[in-house]
Image (tube, rainbow, N blue to C red):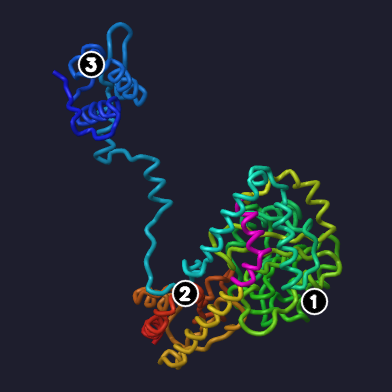
């Protein structure tokens, strides 16, 4: 006789407890496939519960496929054992589980990761951000639920325009600013705006994700080599490119800051022909640690050929996917006509919060605090290297422009050997050679490593340097 006890059900509803007990018996094989279950009324009397309790439990089991019903005959246990057995023994795998395993690989843990630019928890202004979120939700309730303009809410674009005017000497109107969820999204918009038939020149070496985005959109890329001042104009002139993508304030990965003379050369190149444009990626200009920032290309552009792109992922957190671009006025009308139908990809909650963060002066204070913190961390790292035996093996360059510098190692070991030996010592390194397209120029970057120090714990710096020495000697 089929029966169950309800003594240990706690606060669970009677029908839910009965459903779970019966499901367990079906899965374990105690209730066998094809076995007829008691009628609702007789089962209810037997258990001492209402008929409705049994009816609800049977309904759940039927909905999930554990039982089936035949008109005027009753309920029967479904035949689920063969599939369940194959799943349990691994003869078949759950597609969902397989996807989860692939998407969430276990990351290797390092004592010090000199390739990471993730924001450390103590660096994010959680308390201020939380207060602003509450204030925004209390004061902007009506606006939070309205669809924003495609370029982003006006208060945020006004705040960004004021920030650019005060700190980058850029005279732009809020209408020129387009807000989007990350620079990758904005690059896609620019490809659509400038045309899939355009030829895009990118820096070599350079940030490989930019190359991959252009490749994913199926557009043609030209990889232009650099000299000590940045992208080489003579190579650009000899290419068929009509759009160039550069990071003149702090090139990644070399750390080069493009001098004003080279900037004017590139602006001259853009002015020579119609439909030539420069995408200026100013990704971490806020963190120049020495000297006054050189003016942006956009601020000295007189022909409307520079598209300025920046992001808050470096200055706030990589998980705050808020970026923006400033379109030159001649391109603005084209954007509205061709791409004005796009909705803004950043939620109103984040936009209003960031607008308040900038407008109330919190952003400026945060940048100043982080600049001081990064300068201190960089100095601690450089001092630790100078006082270590590692100093006899390495040469440091480009340490003032941003959040990484280059370390050249005097060694006969290959880059791969140094990287592997460092990993064995808990140190993650990335060689400059990895950022080249093609193999010819890689020999010139051999034994040079990109040292990103923004995510290193200060308390680990001395030991990290010692482990670097062990890997390089």
Work out which quarter of the rendered image holds the N terminus and state it. Answer: top left
Q: Nearer the viewer, residue 361 or 86?
A: 361
Q: Is residue 5 above or below residue 87?
A: above
Quarter of the figure with residue 251 = bottom right
Residue at the image point whose x is 63% and y is 51% from the top: 346
Label 3 to label 2, Cα distance in Å? 67 Å
Residue numbers of the magenta segment: 349-366
Residue 234 is at least partly visible in this image: no
Q: Nearer the viewer, residue 254 or 176?
A: 176
N-terminal-most mark, 2 or 1: 2
Q: Residue furthest top?
A: 72
Residue 95 location, x and y as percent?
39, 40
Give the total number of marks visible in the rendering.
3
* Residue assigned mark 3: 44
Residue at the image point whose x is 52% and y is 63% from the top: 127
N-terminal-most mark, 1 or 3: 3
Closer to the eye: label 2 or 1: 2
Label 2 to label 1, Cα distance in Å? 34 Å
Q: Is residue 372 left or right of residue 221?
A: left
Tell me whether circle 1 and circle 3 mark residues in contact (CB < 8 Å).
Answer: no
Residue 406 is at least partly visible in this image: yes
Work out which quarter of the rendered image holds the C terminus and state it. Answer: bottom left
Closer to the eye: label 3 or 2: 3
Q: Secondary structure at mark 3?
A: helix
Q: Is residue 356 magenta?
A: yes
Residue 114: image tag:
2
N-terminal-most mark, 3 or 2: 3
Q: Nearer the viewer, residue 137 or 22?
A: 137
Tell me whether circle 3 and circle 2 mark residues in contact (CB < 8 Å).
Answer: no
* Residue assigned mark 1: 265
């Amino acid at each position: 006789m089929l029966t169950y006890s309800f003594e240990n059900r706690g606060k669970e509803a009677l029908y839910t407890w009965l459903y779970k007990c019966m499901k367990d018996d079906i899965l374990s094989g105690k209730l066998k496939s094809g076995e007829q279950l008691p009628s609702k009324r007789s089962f209810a009397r037997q258990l001492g519960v209402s008929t409705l309790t049994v009816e609800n439990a049977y309904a759940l089991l039927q909905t999930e496929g554990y039982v089936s019903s035949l008109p005027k005959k009753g309920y029967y246990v479904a035949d689920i054992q063969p599939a369940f057995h194959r799943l349990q023994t691994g003869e078949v795998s759950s597609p969902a589980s397989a996807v989860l395993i692939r998407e969430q690989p276990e990351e290797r843990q390092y004592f010090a990761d000199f390739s990471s630019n993730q924001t450390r928890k103590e660096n994010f202004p959680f308390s201020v951000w939380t207060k602003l979120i509450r204030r925004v939700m209390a004061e902007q309730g009506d606006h939070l639920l309205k669809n924003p303009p495609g370029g982003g809410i006006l208060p945020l674009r006004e705040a960004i325009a004021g920030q650019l005017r005060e700190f980058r000497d850029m005279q732009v109107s809020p209408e020129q600013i387009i807000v989007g969820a990350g620079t990758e999204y904005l690059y896609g918009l620019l490809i659509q705006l400038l045309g899939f038939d355009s030829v895009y020149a990118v820096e070599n070496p350079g940030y490989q994700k930019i190359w991959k985005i252009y490749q994913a959109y199926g557009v043609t890329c030209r990889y232009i080599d650099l000299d000590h001042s940045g992208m080489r104009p003579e190579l650009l002139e000899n290419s068929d490119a009509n759009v160039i993508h550069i990071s003149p304030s702090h090139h990644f990965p070399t750390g080069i800051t493009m001098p004003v003379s080279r900037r004017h050369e590139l602006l001259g190149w853009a002015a020579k022909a119609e439909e030539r444009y420069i995408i200026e990626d100013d990704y971490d200009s806020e963190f120049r640690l020495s000297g006054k920032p050189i003016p942006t290309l956009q601020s000295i552009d007189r022909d409307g050929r520079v598209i300025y792109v920046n992001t808050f992922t470096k200055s706030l957190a990589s998980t705050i996917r808020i970026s923006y671009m400033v379109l030159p006025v001649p391109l603005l009308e084209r954007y509205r006509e061709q791409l004005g139908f796009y909705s803004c990809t950043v939620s109103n909650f984040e936009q209003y919060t960031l607008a308040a963060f900038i407008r109330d002066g919190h952003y400026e204070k945060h940048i100043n605090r982080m600049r001081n913190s990064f300068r201190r961390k960089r100095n601690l790292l450089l001092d630790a290297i100078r006082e270590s035996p590692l100093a006899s093996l390495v040469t440091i360059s480009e340490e003032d422009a941003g959040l990484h510098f280059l370390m050249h190692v005097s060694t006969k070991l290959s880059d791969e050997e140094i990287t592997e030996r460092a990993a064995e010592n808990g140190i993650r390194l990335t060689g400059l050679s990895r950022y080249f397209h093609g193999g010819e120029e890689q020999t010139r970057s051999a034994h040079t490593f990109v040292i990103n120090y923004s995510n290193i714990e200060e308390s680990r710096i001395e030991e990290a340097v010692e482990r670097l020495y062990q890997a390089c000697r």
